[in-house]
Image (cartoon, rainbow, N blue to C red):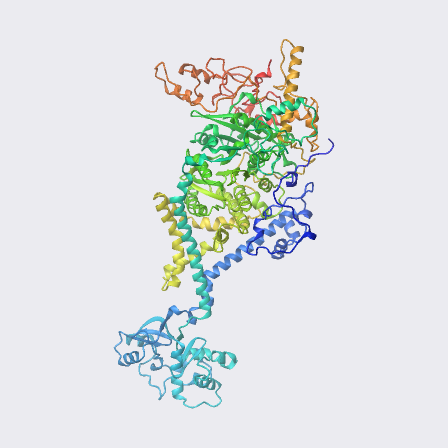
Amino acid sequence: MASNYPHKVEASDVPIPTTRRPTQLASQATVRRAKTLTRPERSVAPVPLITPQPIGVPVTDSVSSGGFDPWKLFSRIITFWAPAALLSSLGGLDDKQKRQAWREKITLCFIVLCLCGTVGFITVGLQNVFCPQVSGGNAARFVSIGTTPGFVAIGGFMFNSTQSGNTVIQGLSTQLSGQDISNQFQRPASFYTECNGDKFRAAADDPCQSTTNCQLGALNAQTIASLGLRNTTLRAGYDWDQVAKLANYLVLDGTVINMTPYMAVHTSPVAGDNIDTALRAVLSGKNGKDGTLMFYGRSDLKAAVPCLTQRYHAGNIDKITPGCFISQLVLYAGLIVILGLIMIRFVMACIFNWFLSARLAGNISSSQFNKSAISPSVMPEGANVSIDNVNGHAPWAGGAHKKLQKTLKSPRSTGSGSTLVNSDAPAPIMSLAQIGAELFAVCLVTCYSEGEDSLRTTLDSISTTHYSDSRKLLFIVADGMITGHGEKRSTPDICVSLLEPDPRFGNPMPVAYEAVGSGAKGENRAMVYAGHYIIAGRRTPTVIVVKCGTEREAATDKKPGNRGKRDSQLILMKFFSSVTYNDRMSPLDFDLFRKIHILMGVTPDFFEVCLMVDADTKVYPESLKHLVNCMQHDQMIMGVCGETRIANKRQSWVTAIQVFEYFISHHMAKAFESVFGGVSCLPGCFSMFRLKARKSTGDDWVPLIIKPEIVKQYSQSEVVTLHEKNLLLLGEDRFLTTILIRTFPNRKMMFLPQAKCRTVVPDTFPVLLSQRRRWINSTIHNLMELVLVRNLCGTFCFSMQFVVFMDLLGTVVLPVAIVLTYLLMVTVILNPPKSFEEAIPVLLLGAVLGLPAVLILITTRKVVYVFWMLIYLLALPIWNFILPVYAFWHFDDFSWGETRKVEGEGKGEAHGDGPAALQPINVPLRRWEDWERSRLRKLKREEKRRRELERMHPSGYQTGEGYLNTRHEVRSYDGSDTTSVLSSDDDHWGTQIGGYNEHNPSYPPPPLALHTQHVNASGETLAGDQLEAMLEAGFDDGSSPHNSSLRLAPRQQDRHQLYDTPVTHSNGYTALSRAQSPTSPGMPRNGMAMSSGVAEWKGHVKKRSGGKVDARDYGPLGPLDPGSRI
């Protein structure tokens, strides 16, 4: 008992059998032929995203920075200008991890700037750099000579001469369409500015001499207009064959030079003129007529090129240049990829909405229920079962309870590792008809700072869904002792006040569990309230888990018990993982097991799906049934989400701009991803996950969201790098989806539009800014991980991996995209496109903005969404510039900011950050068999003590704590279950087990649903208030409208309020109405029901969890055990 149990559990602690053959030793290895076209690394389990630290080693700078890390080195190179001393003194970054996070943020922003600059250059600058207009290298701007009648060329540009009445021009255009007539105009040598100062004859000669006939007048705009010539702005295009046939024509860097006037003046070589010599060498045609290499190879010849091209320019080679070819190749490739991706998304989204989704949401055919499959009580491969348990049943299946009772009377066992043999277990194979179309579903509702109206709306919507109450369980988790901003009661008080408590469970006691948190916050305590949620005749089994914190935390912290939404989800995931594998349970897990078993009538291993809903979400009546049908249709589906709509769309301009964004993200993005079964993010506000799935063979279970590897990755709390914190602390829903896809890449994540919900979105800009900052940063870091998953659906550009890469790139370059969009719009207005290449960006913009409108009309047929789309387009600068830039600059901000404010809270740190633990985490972990033995021993001791007290006090007695219990001792857990099995009646595990007997025959279980039809035999007319009271209180067998109103008055008795009137069920159980609160012996009575909102009783859970107040101050539930007074 001296050693303490470590607070972390390694995967090696859980024995997981395998069917693989053992690997041979190196000495026995032989060389043999193997497959070469397979990729064996794809079958290897992926490396965890978050690498856990060694057990017992605190996370320090030395541990987190051990070894060579290229990313850290690169971040230090980028931020070399910011030494640590400067960041500490001026930046206030005293902690080394904060300084490193700041460096990584600057590095990420640098990468984002580089990507934005690259996209901007490809979009705008690539064409101007590789194919400038002055080069004439674009084939679309040419008119080839000899192809279009009525054209002549002047200075390399084509002029339309069809309207000209000049006979000279008409004759030249008829002789050779498009030929150069520049030498027919009068112009002085000074007309060509590039030739000023040059001494060679080709530059200094007068263009018009006796040998040349300049008969068309001066070369100016007035002369050209008087001749009836019209400039087409297109260039004269020559091919190489034409240049070779034309005398005195040559080519310099793609420019065609007409040297006919010069050669007519200088019929013989000019002595001492190197330019003349070079021109005659090229014009001789011995080595072709391309003088580019000769002229650009010598400096004196290269200097003459600008003058020659300006004075003797006749046109250009109409073949595209390499630079223009590269530019057009990139442009067309971008057009094909982006427009193809947009069109494919659009078409696939339409196909999914029209055909696939309806089949998934439809009812299950009767033929599917004729199949046989494995029973839910059979544990999967790798679970902890005894050797002689042939069928692999759970120890609680069948007659395990009786076996445990018999074991208590048997000789002492040798240890807890010997699991009891269950010979009375049911058959391992059962018909699917026994389970039916409605799977056992647990509905997880996570609460933080929501008010009563939000909680009522959510719970009412789930409870009234068209789904049997006997097949769904409300699992509510209140994340700490939190009072929302502007609320008078704490969130746990509100949750508990809505519950109709079950009298068999008494008043809950705080029990420990391992939480998601660092340091001292790695341990937490919670209380489990159990009962039913009643609304409109529906009676839904409900458990409420209130995280109340440790005793020290409850006395000192502002938010005791608060560990974040991820910890709330992990309470459920760890519980069902322990149940599925018969793994070790915490006291909280065992308490949940007992209460869920009694409420539902089946053990928790019968649950197959889990619906996760936020506490401000309203679920549509048919949604739960549609989601379960989707799971039933395809066993490969491990997660599915529905459509989330906005409940407060007209509240402010902030909510109005979000309506279309929510619509298009579901009906286009998620619908397209669903065709391939790869939805990259299931929103945490409304998603269903499969706890475990049957194999295709039907002979075993495959745990999914409760798989130990998934739970371990999702429960990491010791994170040090910026990437890890953005994954874990900002977007739990996206990170959970990421690790599921990485672990099960061949399974499906789906979207089902038939399942709908409404949620409340931020109505002020600061809250929206804070929410989107978390979402954008979480999206980027999760997509960085998903893009590395190689075995997703498809290959190369036609794969989900490529789609994920495009989503990542599109998210990063959002700021430059909106800038280029508005630049394009201005450019198109000022200078409309004249060619297809210039119109390509306009086509892309039209496809991006126009196709969503078409999708709206053909899928929903609601024209009103076009109006919301126009509002969204007006807000594009906010969505694509302000929000992303703000998020990028806050890469190192891991808080929730303004999203969920609580009373008296400022901007705090991330959930779970706590001081160093003064002592090791001491949460006992034992398997169900050991907890059950201790529970039975405790009942035996309690019964023995009760009989002794009855003999000692014949006149009666009353306990001080509301129920009999063993003395309160806190002992260290040594990691062994042997003590609990071999101990005597003085069992020290009794303090960790709830002091109630769920099998007490005095309190039989309540009915699972009330479907009895009542008739008003008296025929009297009932008033509206009477009808409302009847609906609120429910109907009992044999009740009448007269005494139904009596049930609304609180009973003033020092016990749970079971009614003394004859209006009760046959089993003696009558649930409280929502208007009532059970009274406590220590609470004042004023003739009306007490509420947890009264200031004196506010925060009852916090008082109880501290352990320093009167045990009678229990708040709204009070001491529920009727046996507290004898």
Task: Judge by depth and name the residue closer to the eye, 200 or 751.
Answer: 751
**Residue, x 41% and y 47% (percent of image)?**
349
Q: Which residue ends up furthest to the right in the rendered image?
A: 2
Answer above or below: position of 214 versus 847: below
Which quarter of the figure is the C terminus placed in? top right
Farthest-out residue, left: 165
The spot of residue 601 in percent (x, y) is 52, 26
Give left or right: position of 1107 versus 1098. right
Residue 702: quarter of image: top right
Which of these two is toward me, 828 or 838? 838
In the picture shown, does residue 285 fall above or below 417?
A: below
Q: Is residue 195 left or right of residue 983?
A: left
Q: Is residue 56 left or right of residue 821?
A: right
| Closest to the observer, 751 or 24 | 24
**Image quarter in which the N terminus is found:** top right
Above or below: residue 1002 compared with residue 66 = above
Q: Give the residue at the far top of this rendering.
A: 955
**Between 59 and 43, the one nearer to me in the picture:** 43
Q: How many marks?
A: 0
Q: What percent of the width, then of the height, locates residue 847?
A: 39, 54
Is residue 702 shown above or below 825? above
Regarding residue 449, the answer to whether it shows in the image is no
- Which residue sits at x=48%, y=46%? 678
Percent coordinates x, y for residue 497 in the rendering: 51, 25
Residue 534 drawn at (x, y percent):
46, 25
Q: Could you tell me if residue 233 is visible in this image?
A: yes
Left or right: 948 as drawn, with respect to 213: right
